[in-house]
Image: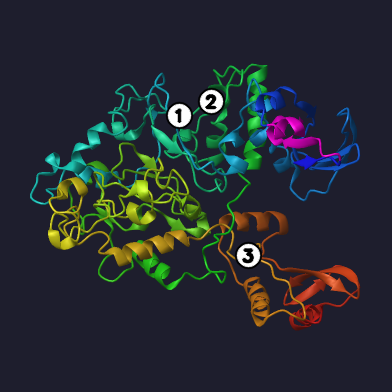
């Protein structure tokens, strides 16, 4: 926003509408929003205006889609000049940015775009119920690597109760809306199994970030874009095709007037949209999540998070499995092959940063929900914090934070696909993770007396599989919150040194130098490095220094242990010499 020098006009950029709105400040001050809105003037500025500066009767606007400065007449709105700024991004990535924001391209009346919910490619922290009652179920082709464990619930007696009569088994027939017997796979064969389907009525789903999608397989909470407008039959985990399958959202969700029927015979409008989806995919799949702000800057885990990691990976002493059975059986071998009947946390949440897997590898699992969901990643769990208080509910150990109404709230939605669980700690109190060592109906637990162990799942794992206590549960929370990401924690950090800098600032500068030499594991960054520079060793970051040297603005890049200056013919500076330059400045 900007106010003119006379103080009577407010200029406001509208990124998604390609406009600058001009308001009468007197009308805004009177509180008459209707008059102010009816008298607003719009100046069209193509390219996504995102910032502006006023100088006399000139408007200088920054356009985000094409990275230009546009000069406009503030009185008439006429464009006077358009100047391109330097942009180091590849041209193919720049070309697709407008598809995220431009409501004129996304919808028929210019009021809706992807960024309306995926704010700046991230999330609005809300849950939306976008199920379609008029649509049919579709086939779920994704690998369900723990399906044999889900079926074990109906094969093993639990706590003296025949499993077929137990809580865990009873839910299976209702999964995915009881299924549709007419669902077919890519080959046209009928797949009546309700556990191998996507339900058309999916219920509330939290808005997911669109960042960091390039290594996580089929998209959406359920991975249901593995099966869409453009066939994924050749590779069900192809992120690009899965992303392009969102083309149907422009017609069905955003209200764009386009007819999508046969992908092999598109009309002109549909073909133009398909071409723009290619550009959109190039842009969006290149956007990555930022470094984890909770992880220590030296890349290590905190002590408690390291303990949580050991349990997560199945490496904790005396407890290698968090779900299923402690020892394998042959009950499901005929149907599923010789698969283990119990897994660690990592057995579902694949944790291989070198391969781009941060808790998710494109597979699905049944975690006691009424749908089969894709196993989610961990890289942005810290952004979901803010809902506090959880009433006791079926399938979870009794909650001790059920005073929801009396607690301060930051967000209305929390964790899991629907945002209905307030904290990770309470999520890890799910009966499926409990080790069954303590009877929750026992008054000695400190919980309410007379609770139903079967309902709350506190006899689920016979005392030898699952999370043994709250200390381990909290260590798992710490590990998940400090999860690795595609960028090292040190990326983006900076420090200013001068003669008055405290010792801690010099320590931070030395930490930056150290981390810039430390090797790092990231599939995404390795791919970028090898594409742009050939086969080089990836480190946690690159390090540059900027400052005044002999009253001139200078820059240096740390390479091979020395700082290379920004001018040819000059000698490199050692690390100590560079730090000394900073220490002598005032």
Residue 538, numbered label: 3
The picture quadrant where one finds residue 557 is bottom right
Does residue 548 appear to the left or right of 254 in the view shown?
right
Q: Secondary structure at mark 3?
A: loop
Ranked by sequence position, the earlier of labels 1 and 2 is 1
Residue extent of the magenta highlight = 6-30
Q: Residue 137: x percent and y percent? A: 37, 25
Which residue occupies 34% across, 52% down? 427
Which residue occupies 24% across, 46% down? 395
Which residue bears the numbered disc 2?
Answer: 253
Cα gap from disc 2 to disc 3, whole angstroms: 41 Å
Which residue bears the numbered disc 1?
Answer: 130
**Magenta stretch contains residue 387:** no
Cα gap from disc 1 to disc 2, whole angstroms: 9 Å
Residue 511, numbered label: none
Front position in the image: 7 or 241: 7
Ranked by sequence position, the earlier of labels 2 and 3 is 2
Does residue 282 appear to the left or right of 57 in the view shown?
left
The picture quadrant where one finds residue 174 is top left
Cα gap from disc 3 to disc 1, whole angstroms: 41 Å
Ranked by sequence position, the earlier of labels 3 and 1 is 1
């Amino acid at each position: 926003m900007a106010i003119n020098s006379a103080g009577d006009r407010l200029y406001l950029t509208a990124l998604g509408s390609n406009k600058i709105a001009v308001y009468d400040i007197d009308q805004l001050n009177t509180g008459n929003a209707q008059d102010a809105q009816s008298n607003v003037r719009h100046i069209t500025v193509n390219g996504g205006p995102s910032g502006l500066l006023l100088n006399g009767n000139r408007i200088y606007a920054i356009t985000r889609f094409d990275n230009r400065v546009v000069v406009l007449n503030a009185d008439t709105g006429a464009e006077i000049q358009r100047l391109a700024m330097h942009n180091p991004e590849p041209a193919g990535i720049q070309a697709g940015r407008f598809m995220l924001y431009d409501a004129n391209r996304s919808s028929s009346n210019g009021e809706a775009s992807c960024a309306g919910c995926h704010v700046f490619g991230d999330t609005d922290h809300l849950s939306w119920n976008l199920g379609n009652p008029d649509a049919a179920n579709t086939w779920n082709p994704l690998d369900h690597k723990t399906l044999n464990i889900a079926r074990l619930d109906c094969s093993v007696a639990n706590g003296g109760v025949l499993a077929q009569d137990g809580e865990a088994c009873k839910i299976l027939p209702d999964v995915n809306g009881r299924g549709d017997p007419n669902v077919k796979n890519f080959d046209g064969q009928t797949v009546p199994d309700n556990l191998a389907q996507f339900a058309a009525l999916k219920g509330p789903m939290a808005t997911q970030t669109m960042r960091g999608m390039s290594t996580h397989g089929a998209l959406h909470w359920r991975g249901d874009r593995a099966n869409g407008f453009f066939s994924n039959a050749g590779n069900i985990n192809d992120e690009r095709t899965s992303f392009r399958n969102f083309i149907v959202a422009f017609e069905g969700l955003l209200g764009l007037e386009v007819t999508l029927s046969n992908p092999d015979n598109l009309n002109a409008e549909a073909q133009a949209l398909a071409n723009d989806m290619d550009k959109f995919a190039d842009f969006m799949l290149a956007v990555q999540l930022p470094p984890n702000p909770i992880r220590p800057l030296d890349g290590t885990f905190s002590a408690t998070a390291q303990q949580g990691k050991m349990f997560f990976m199945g490496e904790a002493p005396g407890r290698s499995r968090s779900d299923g059975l402690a020892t394998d059986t042959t009950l499901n071998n005929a149907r599923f092959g010789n698969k283990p009947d119990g897994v660690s946390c990592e057995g579902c949440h694949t944790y291989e940063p070198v391969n781009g897997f941060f808790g998710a590898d494109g597979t699905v699992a049944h975690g006691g929900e009424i749908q089969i969901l894709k196993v989610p990643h961990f890289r942005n769990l810290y952004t979901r914090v803010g809902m506090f208080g959880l009433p006791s509910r079926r399938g979870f150990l009794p909650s001790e934070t059920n005073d929801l109404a009396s607690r301060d709230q930051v967000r209305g939605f929390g964790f899991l696909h629907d945002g209905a669980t307030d904290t990770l700690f309470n999520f890890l109190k799910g009966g499926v993770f409990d080790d069954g060592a303590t009877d929750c109906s026992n008054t000695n637990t400190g919980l309410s007396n007379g609770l139903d162990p079967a309902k709350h799942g506190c006899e689920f794992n016979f005392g030898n599989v699952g999370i043994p206590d709250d200390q381990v549960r909290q260590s798992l929370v710490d590990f998940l919150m400090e999860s690795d990401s595609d960028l090292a924690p040190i990326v983006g950090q900076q420090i200013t040194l001068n003669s008055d800098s405290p010792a801690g600032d010099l320590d931070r500068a030395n930490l930056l130098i150290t981390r810039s030499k430390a090797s790092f594991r990231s599939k995404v960054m390795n791919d970028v490095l090898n594409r742009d520079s050939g086969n080089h060793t990836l480190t946690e970051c690159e390090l540059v220094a900027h400052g005044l040297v002999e009253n001139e603005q200078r820059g240096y890049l740390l390479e091979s242990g020395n700082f290379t200056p920004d001018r040819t013919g000059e000698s490199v500076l050692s690390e100590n010499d560079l730090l000394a330059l900073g220490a002598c400045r005032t």
